[in-house]
Amino acid sequence: MMLLNMLFTFFKIGLFSFGGGYAILAMIQQEVVIKNAWLTEAEFVQVVAISQMTPGPIAINAATFIGYQKAGVIGSLLCTLGVILPSLMIMLLITVSYLKLKKLPWFQQIFKRLRLLSVGLIAAALIMIMGNAVKDWYSVGIFAASFLLTWRFKLNPFTMLIAAAIFGMLFGSV
């Protein structure tokens, strides 16, 4: 029964938590420490510390560690499944809906507008970041060269990132 309770608890956390990993931690603490008393406050702090140090999303890491601590490998699997299942189900629903509706004209118009919105959001992020990223004309030159080479010659952006970093370290002023 405890295993089902753990699965349901982390499913609820995954379904109703918004705002990223750190926002989810408050709900995990509420459910795991206060409501179910599976961990003490000190144990929860240790789980958070370990979850931050491990690669991957903090909510999934925390669910995995809490499940393992309470019920071994099976508990770990169930808690992890519980926290990711809502997102998986929502994405599956969106994908199936998209595949069924993608040829309809009204749906294509929605996605046409969403593409414009995406470009606007990316441009807004670029403008906000540029204030901190542009330090001198040298950095503007590296940006412009990287942008033009990637766009004109369809070079891999990751390759351009590495090349710009090397070029900046070798010839840039610090």
Image: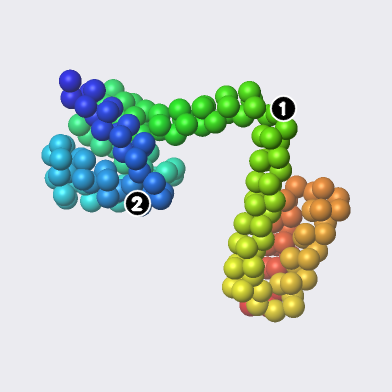
Circle 1 sits on which residue?
Answer: 103
- Split into 4 quadrants, where in the image is the C terminus? bottom right
Q: In the picture provided, is 27 more to the left or to the right than 122?
A: left
Q: Is residue 168 above or below residue 153?
A: below
What label sits on residue 23 in the rendered view?
Answer: 2
Q: Position of residue 1 (x, y in %)?
A: 17, 20
| Mark 2–mark 1 distance (CA, rounded to whole Å) | 38 Å
- Give the camera-side residue of 41 and 6: 6
Q: Nearer the viewer, residue 10 or 171?
A: 10
Secondary structure of residue under mark 1 = loop
x 66%, y 74%: residue:
134
Residue shown at 26% from the left, 33% from the top: 9
Residue 107 figure quarter: top right
- Whether residue 59 appears in this view of the structure is yes
- Residue pictured at 22% horizontal, 23% vertical: 3
Q: Could you tell me the amino acid type at mark 2?
A: Ala
Q: Residue most toward the top? A: 1
Which residue type does callout 1 highlight?
Answer: Lys
